[in-house]
Image: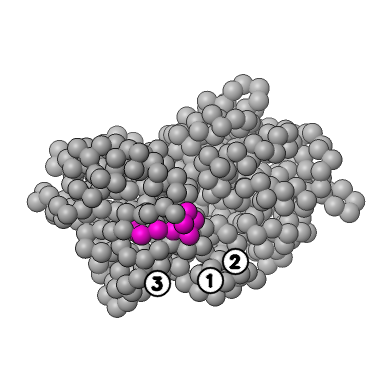
Amino acid sequence: MNPQRRLRLIGRLDIKNEFLIKGIQMEGVRKLGDPVLHARRYYEQGIDELLFLDAVASLYGRNNVFQIAEAVCRDVFVPITIGGGLRSLADIDAALGAGADRVAVCTEALKTPDFISEAARVFGSQCIVGSIQAKRRESHWEAYSDCGREASGIDVVRWAQELEALGAGELLLTSVDRDGTRQGYDVALMAAVSAAVGIPVQACGGAGGASHVREVFDGSEVEAAVVGTVLHYGVLDVGQLKGALASQGVPIRRGGASAR
Amino acid sequence: MNVNNGMTPESPTIAVLDFGLGNLTSIQNALRQVGARPALASSAAEAMAADGCILPGVGAFGAGMARLRAAGLDAAIEAFVPTGRPLLGICLGMQMLFEGSEESPDVAGLGLLRGRVRHVTGLVGGGVRVPHVAWRPLVESGPGRFREGLLAAVREADALYFVHSFAACPDSQGDQLAHVRYGDGELCAAVRRGQVFGCQFHPEKSGPVGLGIMGHFVRMCAQGAGV
């Protein structure tokens, strides 16, 4: 266990056309407003990274997410990841060109695992995040694709190790069951996967407050916690969340634009 | 939104070397934010016309040096540095300032700083995740090194953003401005030799603290140009 382990807080924004949306277990959708304004606000409050997920890339094309990322990058200076429907090297190139530092790939990796190794070779492992959508089964978790709709029959822990071997630099691990519920992360899932790989793992799905983030940090070896739904309504802001985590001893970066 | 950010006609021009690697958009946006005029440079002439130069880079050492040489930018850097104007290498760009890297053993670096680049695991032991992806506070590598122009505004608890699998090992301890603690050891975070600077972290991705560092670099470039 790394004595210098730290936690990054990643703000997730799900995009449908030009709107920020809220998903519940990846089924329901509600429009929440302008994603660029939300992204800027999270940055000012001290978010460590931003994750833009295109919720409908396969249906309508994905220019909106790239445009949003481009606009955000003009005055938001933290790392940005784009995901959702990225299927080719050209897609990745376009995402990086729009200002993303990394791309998250889920469905295409399950269909064509070599896509990950090719992408890692061309763009570098640190640019490629293997995205896993996990649904609980009795004794294990199954990897899903297409926003948690299509079962793959593949065990998540085994798939995580495969993604690492293929060259992914990091893993974005989402519990489909917990997503949008604000009832806490699937800590057992995060523990099982983070113990099985040597690359950083990001926990995603279910964050409702600081205690959940602390639980997943203490209960697994994840190095990042993704928060989405809980931020969008402004009930809890990034500054409050980080303050609570810091006071509970979680090693997290302090400060946003207002702190200087 | 202020379209011009801090730019004025007197803003120093900073050449961002373009050899196809690195988040050039973010670097340019950050430069504008701190009052500089960014200019993508893919030739020696474009670099020589600037008040300062940034060598970006993300990815593998071998690929980086090959692309840099193919674009003739290694020669551009070799012409630029002796003029005394500041040069800043970021991430892979910092690594390329050194003599070589374990990542690509047969490839020569620029050799502007003495020393080689090694894999993180070899430097800090096993038990750490690679790549090293984290916001980490800098530690001064020697007394007063934060007072060097580049890191003058950095405070003890300020964290900067790192994402890398290899780190530089300067031959001369005096060249190292700052390091971070990782695993059981330390990783070189920032270096300086004369007017050549390097940051392993991404100042253009490290929020307000990173912008502060970019701002100090820009000020050094402005001073050099007599602006």
* Residue under label 1: B124
Chain letter of disc 3 in the image: B
- What's drawn in magenta, residue-wise? B97-105
Residue drawn at point x = 14 percent, y = 52 percent = B83
Q: Residue under mark 2: which chain is it in?
A: B
To the question of a shared chain for discs 1 and 3, the answer is yes
Residue at the extreme front of the image, as rendered: B106
B20 sits left or right of B194 in the view? right
Mark 1 vs 3, N-terminal side: 1
**Earlier-in-chain disc, 2 versus 3:** 2
Place residue B131 in its image quadrant: bottom right
> Does residue B98 show up magenta in the picture?
yes
Amino acid of disc 3 = Val
Q: Chain of mark 1?
A: B
Answer with left or right where residue B212 lies relative to residue A41.
left
Residue type at mark 2? Val
Residue holding disc 3: B139
Q: Is residue A21 above or below residue B200?
A: above
| Circles 1 and 3 in contact, beta carbons < 8 Å | no
